[in-house]
Image (cartoon, grey):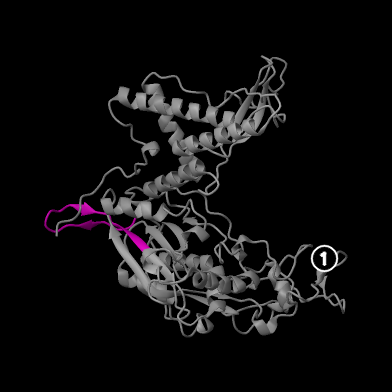
Amino acid sequence: MVTFTSTLDSRPTGLGVDDAARQARELARSAAEANGVCTSPIVRAVHDRETGVSHLVPIPCGSTRESKCKGCADKARRLRMHQCREGWHRDVEPDLPPAPEKTPDEDDDEPENDGPAPDRAVRSTRRLPDVPDLPKQDMNPGTIGRTFTDPKTGQRFRPSMFLTLTLGSYGRIKPGTGVPTNPDRYDYRTAALDALMFSRVVDRFMQNLRRCAGYNVQYFAAVEPQRRLAPHLHAAIRGTIPRAIVKQVAAATYFAAWWPSCTDADVVYSDRAEPPVWDEDTLSYRDPHTGRALPTWKEATARLEDPAHVVRLGKQVDVKGLLGGTPDSDRAVRYLCKYLTKSIASTYAAPGDDSADDVPASDYDRHIDRLHAHVRVLPCGPSCANWLRYGVQPKNPTPGLQPGACLSPAHDRENLGLGGRRVLVSRGWSGKTLTQHRADRAAVVRQALEAAGIEHDDADRLSTTQETADGRARYVWREPEAGTYTYAAVITASLQEQLRRRGQYDAAKQALGASPPGPVDNRSATAATPAAPAA
């Protein structure tokens, strides 16, 4: 843990001093970014009651966005890469965490049970008539998939898959540009609803895939927008499934939103209209003119005959078989994680790329604006504040909601419906949480230092659990006083500590004669690396 002391120069500041401080700040930031050090640390003061000495401790911000902190974002990306590798090509079953209790989801097209009330909503469990049936397969509780034997050599292999799923078309797109040929005919409303519900249809696909694959399929997936702004999914799948089955499951997967109608014709409170008011006595929203309570979510969904929207996957389904430890597998891991440090907006393939030089930037911006105009006002879920726009109270309403102003990041222009998790990891992928993977990486460094006889820092040396002789906490953490440090001093101390630790670890590896296996080197937990089968 980095600790340092620093005081500001108390002399009067002038233009020259300000320029020097600004240059020192920029130099410190550049050096930190070049060496993977946090550039936006949270500084805390720690007072030692036994010695009377106070320390300033910079704590890494932990951001996963490169635009906010390149060092922390890169560490988060590499941690995800290790998590992906460790769970992908396993040949032994992981220790599965306990299954969470299942809670009813009113978005599902399953029978609802809201109690003994006679007017409760009960919906048919039959699949939509225009959707093909799912193939049936006996279920095996295992997660590592099948093995195959090369008839020529007798060698056994356990391949896995790299899968890409997309959404359907909303209109013709100019080749290589992402811009609609005719924006007036492009179905922006459907594109917005599909993006807002994309995570739900992905969950359905994975559920269906498990039922049809014959084993407990595990996955590590990343969500990204395509050039046309529609989201798509890249997924590492443990084990192998026939391509025909995967494509059949994709064609048979859908998500039906049993929500009230939310078309333009259903708008009750537009942006210019006076919004509904909150009634503290009844804990509900009322019309500002008549005082009548708006229909509750249960009332609005009690007698639905058809879903408000159905999301289906597109016909383009790409499946590639891979073996662990091969260059193709390593490239797939890097491809899965390459955009995780960027915001959704920064992954748009905007004009300026080689394939889109003939499209003006204004055309692409207008394409984004048209899609965002729908994403902003359409509901993202049953609890979305945007339901007030359509004269319906959201599920579990709270005061302060405004129609067309839901606070979910899914409605932001930079997200375009993808405001949730960028990484989707199944519970049984590696048998570990991300925190446990992070602890594994630290443990590998600690073990290497101990084996080389190098003293390492005690992670708990400033812990609040340590006590003085009289039973009080030895270390007191608090906000530092204003004017006790500079940004350049914080970054310089963090940089020095980073270089010292890196030097210790390099020395430990050199003393041990080889790079120790483990998470720090981003090696997979797969014990054996199978060779490619003979042609």
Residue 284 is left or right of residue 240, and the answer is right
**Residue located beneath label 1 in the image:** 283
- Residue 160 highlighted magenta (yes or no): yes
Q: Is residue 498 visible?
A: yes
User: In which quadrant of the rendered view does residue 124 lie?
Assistant: bottom right
Nearest the viewer among 344 and 393 is 344
Q: Looking at this rendering, what residue extends furthest in the left direction?
A: 152
Name the element at disc 1. Answer: loop
**Which of the image's four quarters has the N terminus?**
top right
The reply, left or right, for residue 491 in relation to residue 221 is right
Q: Position of residue 400 (x, y in %)?
A: 78, 62
Regarding residue 134, the answer to whether it shows in the image is: no
Give percent across and percent down for residue 104. 61, 65
Residue 259 part of the magenta segment: no
Q: Is residue 308 above or below residue 358?
A: below
Q: Say if 440 sits above or below 86 in the image.
A: above
Viewer-nearest residue: 460 or 122: 460
| Residue 497, placed above or below residue 304 | above
Left or right of 282, for residue 386: left
Q: Residues within 10 Å of mark 1 (few under 14, many from 20)?
A: few
The residue type indicated by label 1 comes to: Leu
Q: Can you say whether 282 is above or below 185 in the image?
A: above
In the image, what residue occupies the spot 20% across and 50% down?
531
Which quadrant holds the C terminus?
Answer: bottom left
Identity of the residue drawn at 68% across and 17% down: 468
The x, y position of residue 434, in whole percent, is 49, 45
In percent of width and height, residue 514 lies at: 28, 29
Q: Does residue 389 appear to the left or right of 123 in the view shown? A: right
Q: Give the residues drawn in magenta, as a range.
A: 143-163
Quarter where residue 219 is shown? bottom left
Instruction: Please name the predominant secondary structure of the magenta segment in the image.
Output: loop
Q: What residue sits 51% from the left and 42% below the top?
A: 72
